[in-house]
Amino acid sequence: MINATGQPQSVLVLGGSSEIAQAIVNRLVEGRCRTVVLAGRPSERLEAAVVSARAAGADTVETVAFDVDATSGHQAWMDDVFARFGNLDLVLVAAGVLGNQESDEQDAEATAAVLTTNFTGPAAALIAAGGCLRRQGHGRIVVLSSVAGERARKANFIYGSSKAGLDAFAQGLSDSLVGSGVGVTIVRPGFVVGRMTEGMDPAPFSTTPDEVATEVVKGITSGAHVVHAPSVLRWVFAVMRHLPRPIWRRMPG
């Protein structure tokens, strides 16, 4: 169980090959986390995440095949994972894609694929995870959202709207779990310099996977409902949300 200082001893990661998730897992393992379950499509990156978690000091690291884009089966899959590994303290939802706005907005199927991977698939998994955690009576869900979801811009409205949907869903799930012993932390990073954004010009207040991990672990241990990374973005977007639309439309990509 999560100990008195808020540190989980076990974690299930949906999107186990995510660079940010890997940084979070390693930071958790440096604390009290000893069991790591990495869920995702089999790949070299997923195997590299296994090696990284073991090197950080985890006692048990296993992979489980998981397809966030599946149209059904999330509940049965989640029930099986909890049955196999017992109580899990933390479920980290990190599956997602950035997509390519320029081409995706010309392709309805590509747009649907981004929305499925970033919103509808994770939402189904969140419902399943919430039910399992509610039944065990304790735990925390961490959802990797984005500041892009706070207000979709013309330059990335497909990705931004997918994260807005996930963010709103996670907020509602959090409210529905009040009193169950299960908490939800929503993480809203800014531009993260890493594999997903390779070749792109960094935006103001850019961050790194390691820096995001630091803020996330702080949020987990404090029981925060929302975490911005870097934290200054909380105040930046408190202003940005209220800019007049003619000004917002001119915001750079």
Image (cartoon, rainbow, N blue to C red):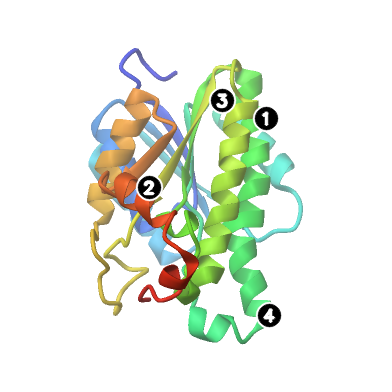
* Residue on which the image places disc 3: 86
The mark nearer the N terminus, 4 or 3, is 3
User: Is residue 63 left or right of 19 when viewed as pictured?
Assistant: right
Q: Earlier in the sequence, mark 1 or mark 4?
A: 4
Q: Who's the residue at 59% across and 21% down the image?
A: 178
Name the quadrant of the C terminus: bottom left
Query: Mark number for residue 229?
Result: none
Q: Position of residue 122 (x, y in %)?
A: 60, 50
Label 4 sits on a secondary structure element that is helix
Residue position marked by numbered label 2 in the rendering = 238
- Dot 3 or dot 1, earlier in sequence: 3
What residue is shown with label 1?
Answer: 131
**4 vs 3, front mark:** 4
State which quarter of the image contains the N terminus.
Answer: top left
Q: Position of residue 9 (x, y in %)?
A: 38, 25
Q: Which residue is mark 4?
A: 108
